[in-house]
Image (spheres, helix red, strand yellow):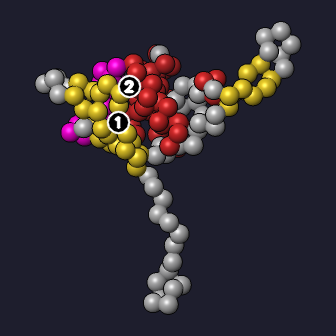
Amino acid sequence: MSENGSHEHGPRLRTEYDFELPHGYVDAQGTVHRRGTMRLATARDELSPLIDQRVRENPAYLGVVLLSLVITRLGAVTDIHAGVVEQLFATDLAHLQDFYRRINGLDTGYGAVACPSCGTSFAVPGPAAGGRLGEA
């Protein structure tokens, strides 16, 4: 407790992060939206796409559904759903997937690989560390 009787707490947990897309989302009116906000993912965010029929039919769709849950704003657009994420340019989608991994502490910079001949596992820096969203 502090001198004034209130409880002292450490620094506030940052749960939202701003980003800027390389190209931007182009809405139906032709407006380009480049700046947005993404919140930290919860366990529910990571798990709920697994019961989504679109993900069950196509596991690669997992990243689209997951991003639609954690992006809270994209320019003036606040109703972010899978259809919005589907319309992103590939570069912007990759940018958001990398951003998701960074803010959620999933980007260690190293990935595990195995030698195809002998099966020995070892860590390598770079893209092998990535993987698809939801595969933490």
Disc 2 designates what residue?
Answer: 92
Q: Residue furthest right?
A: 118
Bounds of the magenta segment: 76-89
Q: Position of residue 56 (x, y in %)?
A: 48, 20
Percent position of residue 51, x then y = 47, 29
Q: Is residue 134 left or right of residue 91?
A: right
Q: Which residue is mark 1?
A: 20
Q: Up-down: is 65 above or below 1? A: above
Question: What secondary structure is found at the residue carrying circle 1?
Answer: strand
Would residue 53 be seen by someone viewing this image from the given angle? no
Q: Which residue appears farthest toward the top when viewing the image?
A: 117
Residue pictured at 39% horizontal, 18% vertical: 90
Quarter occupied by the N terminus: bottom right
Q: Amino acid at mark 1?
A: Glu
- The answer to if 112 sits in the magenta stretch is no
Q: Is residue 122 visible?
A: yes
Residue at the far left: name it: 29
Label 2 packing within 10 angstroms: few (<14), some (14-19), many (20+): some
Image height check: is 10 above or below 83? Answer: below
In the rendered structure, which disc, 1 or 2, sits on the residue that comes first in sequence? 1
* Residue 89 locus on image (x, y percent): 34, 20
Residue at point 46%, 84% (across, down): 6
Q: Nearer the viewer, residue 33 or 58?
A: 33
